[in-house]
Image: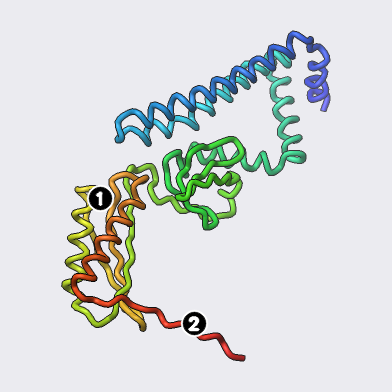
Amino acid sequence: METGLHAWKEFERLTIGDALIAILILLAARVLAEATQRALRHLAETGPARSRLAILRWIPAAKLLIVAGATIAIVPVLVEPTTANVMALVASLGLAMAFALKDFGSSLVAALVTILENTYQPGDWIEIDGTYGEVRQIGLRALHLVTPDDTEVLVPHAKLWTTSIFNASSGNRNLLCTAELYVHPDHDAAVLRERLAAIASSSAFRKPETSVIVVLFEKPWGTQYKVKCHARESREQFQLISDITVRAKESIREMGIRYAVAPPLVPATG
């Protein structure tokens, strides 16, 4: 306890100059972090496509290094950098965060775990609590997720402890896409399956060296087809699905196959 009180007494020696230096360090760290993020993101978007995700992954690591550097620079300004003072200061701040900033502290630790374990990185397509989108930024408290309709969602990192996180790309440029079609059960399934595979294989948005899989399921009201293949770029997944769907519908119409019609829902009776 005496050690902790002695550490806090160090603050009594602070001058206006020391406070200004600490503020300038924080401002410089903020500006440097923002500039680094913008520079890396610009480099990722304008450089070779194969290097985009690799460059984006450096953003959270660079910001973490800047925060660590700013912390190391500020501590000697605030207190005399002895082992006892530093340990007491860290313990006191940790205790304060535990009570006053519990949720923020939990998100901060989760953000650190996310960066170290590569749970998700900028450029990944993930789903959390039913929200699906691309990870654009990993902040200290939350990640910035942009949905397919261009809505930005802030998800606290603390969700890592309690919620399942689905990562569709996991650091890869391409990801598996599925186009679904429903037709009347009275048709030649072998011919249609082959036609759908050919349509997907010829799509300009498909990664050429990957395979195409067509699976089907029989329902009481029709046949469901799932055409699965990899988009060449994760951001082109919806173009791929739309391209396959449009050309598949045209082919189904040319083959004279009727579409399935799901029966209306029958309200439950008591």
Residue 133 drawn at (x, y percent): 47, 49
- Which amino acid, by three-letter code, is at mark 2? Leu
Specify few, some or many for label 1: CA neighbours under 10 Å numbering under 14, 14-19, or 20 or more: many
Q: Residue at x 39, y 46 (%)?
A: 170
- Answer with the quarter of the image where residue 54 lies: top left
Q: Residue at x 30, y 53 (%)?
A: 240
26 to the left or right of 56: right
Q: Position of residue 63 (x, y in %)?
A: 53, 27
Q: Residue at x 61, y 39 (%)?
A: 141
In the rendered structure, which amino acid carries the disc numbered 1?
Arg
Circle nearer the viewer, 1 or 2? 2
In the image, residue 161 sits, relative to residue 138, either above or below, namely below
Secondary element at image label 2: loop
Locate the N terminus by quadrant: top right
- Residue 153's mark? none
Please, is residue 51 above or below residue 231 in the view? Answer: above
Q: CA distance from mark 1 to mark 2?
A: 37 Å
Q: Position of residue 215 (x, y in %)?
A: 27, 68
Disc 1 marks which residue? 206
Label tally: 2
In the image, taking residue 31 as reference, residue 187 lies left or right, namely left
- Identify the image's colour scheme: rainbow, by chain, secondary structure or one colour: rainbow
Q: Earlier in the sequence, mark 1 or mark 2?
A: 1
Of the pair 266 and 135, the residue shown nearer to us: 266
16 horizontally vs 125: left or right: right
Quadrant the C terminus occupies: bottom right
| Disc 2 target residue | 265
Q: Are marks 1 and 2 in contact (CB under 8 Å)?
A: no
Q: Name which residue lies at 53% across and 41% down.
A: 144
Residue lying farthest to the bottom in this orientation: 270
